[in-house]
Amino acid sequence: MIRILLVDDQSLIRRGLKAVLQFEEGLEVLGEADNGETAIHQVAALHPDVILMDIRMPVMDGVAATREICQRFPQTNVLVLTTFDDDEYVTQALQYGAAGYLLKDTPPEELAQAIRAVHKGYTQLGPGIGKKIIAQIPTPPPSPSSSWEELTPREQEILQFIAKGASNREIAQVLYISEKTVKNHVTNILSRLNLRDRTQAAIWANSYSTSR
């Protein structure tokens, strides 16, 4: 029997969920809570297997409660069930240990399946939630070595001077070229490496040098 704790600040929602889940074989609703703080006390007292957790609640919201519960009661799985699919809520809840994130318009049979799945250790995400998570993953920067090879020998040479803090005039004097030519090379370097200014270029060059 999978023991469930319902956490939602609206009693009507809790009653509706309890009425739906009571007809599902192997599921038992053993308690309720109307905010995150009460939920933590209920977890300590009842030791549920799965929690259906709302997000926006008074006293303590579902994100904070999820973090606390996952830290203190790792044997309990939190399945977020809310009307909000805000990117920040999704990301934070999952980072803090939630085993799934569903919206309240999830059909009853799918909700029951999700409860059984998270109880077995699987992660459950509602339609469109996965895309939100992927969108939050930063695009990795280009490999310094491959980007370095895209520069011409002269650009590589000038970038090394930039890394040492040399000005355009100093670079021009050492290489026996005009400042305008140096400036053009610097512009090309920033464009090729997708950098904003000389400071970023210097940091990039030093990072590349230490990684070799």
Image (cartoon, rainbow, N blue to C red):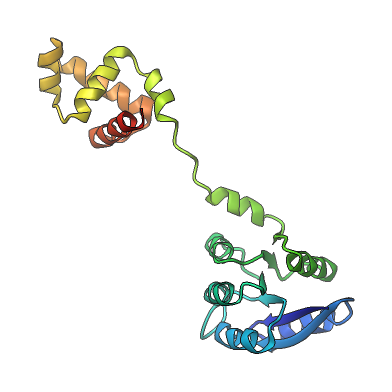
Quarter of the picture holding the C terminus: top left
Would residue 73 be visible to someone looking at this image? yes
- Residue at the image position 37 percent from the left and 24 percent from the top: 192
Across and down, in percent, residue 132 comes to 60, 53
Measuring 27% from the left and 36% from the top, which residue is drawn there?
A: 203
Question: Looking at the figure, which quarter contains the N terminus?
Answer: bottom right
Quarter of image, res 62: bottom right
At 61% from the left and 63% from the top, the residue drawn is 85
Residue 49, percent from left and from top: 72, 76
In the displayed structure, 45 sits above or below 110; it is below
Image position, residue 28 (x, y; %): 81, 82
- Horizontal side of residue 95 vs 169, given as left or right: right
Residue 120: image x %, image y %?
76, 65
Q: Evaluate whether residue 34 shows in this view.
A: no
133 above or below 105?
A: above
Q: Name the foreground residue: 206 vs 184.
A: 206
User: Picture quarter containing residue 169?
Assistant: top left
**Measured along the vertical axis of the image, is residue 147 above or below residue 11?**
above
> Image point 29% across, 30% down: which residue?
205
Please determine whether, in this image, residue 159 is positioned above or below residue 135. Answer: above
